Amino acid sequence: MKKYFLQIILLIFFILSSFSNADVKSVMQKGNDYYKNNQYQLAIEKYKKLVRDGYEGTSLFYNLGNAHYRLGKVGYAILYYEKALKISASDEDVKHNLVLAKLNIKDKVDELPPFFIFNIWEGLLALFTISGWTFIVYIIFILLLVFVVAYFFSKSSTQQRISFFAGITFSVLLFFSIILLVVKMHKEYSIKYGIIVENVVTVKSSPDNSSKDEFVIHEGLKVRLEDKVDIWTKIRLTDGKVGWVLEKNLKQI
């Protein structure tokens, strides 16, 4: 009886999942049809329905970025391209369109000069998403276990030496891969970034409309989010400038 009950539950789950996937594909296709017919706002509405329903995906965010770009909404276009890259960091189409969209940003903010080692480190982190680095750690760990087992069951000293040095090599790779994964997770979950979505935004010295105007930024600029007080968000630019903007003027990636 329990066996049949479990089979019924699994069947119901499979049917519901099938309906859900079919609905997602249907809404996505309608959005794509609107996009092909140059009805970009209608396409955005369909894509955003999927977002509201909790669906996320590289294609969905990529399409949202493209539709907003076609409407001249550079800030939202960059926002969704950045969201797409969080899911698929190596997607060349997304990276290409993000570069094109950034050409429309009015602000040319210089970055604080980092050490060259930091550039290499950031490059490594950007190679994969958290899922990608997790997969790499898993594969290296499995290979390490294989060589450990091979070492103890080797029938010759040559095979033992090969297994030993391979094990050492993969131990080092595992160590650094875990560090990269932990740092990547820290950056993803602890350090937040946002995109300015309003045309012109005045940055204040404190979370108060009557406070001093520090500087002005424009649509599409990526900023680091550091604090929040009521309707105000503290931001930091790549050149080190800090200030407060109204929360409605930006969207978190």
Image (spheres, rainbow, N blue to C red):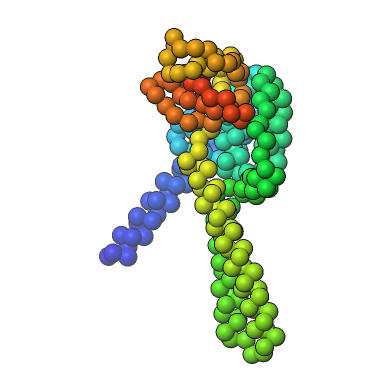
Q: Nearer the viewer, residue 241 or 58?
A: 241
Looking at the image, residue 132 lies above or below residue 21 = below
Taking the spot 43% from the left edge, 18% from the top edge, the residue there is 207
Closer to the camera in the image, 106 or 10: 106
Spot occupied by residue 59 in the image (x, y as percentages of width and height): 60, 38
Q: Is residue 39 visible?
A: no
Q: Quadrant of residue 105?
A: top right
Above or below: residue 125 compared with residue 72: below
User: Please, which residue is most extreme toward the bottom here?
Assistant: 155
Seen from the viewer's position, the closer of residues 173 and 154 is 173
Q: Position of residue 129 (x, y in %)?
A: 58, 47
What residue is drawn where x is 65% and y is 18%? 72
Please tell me which residue is depicted at 60% across the width and 82% down the height of the picture.
Answer: 151
Q: Could you tell me which quadrant the N terminus lies in?
A: bottom left
Q: From the viewer's perspective, is 221 left or right of 96?
A: left
Residue 129, relative to residue 225: is it above or below?
A: below
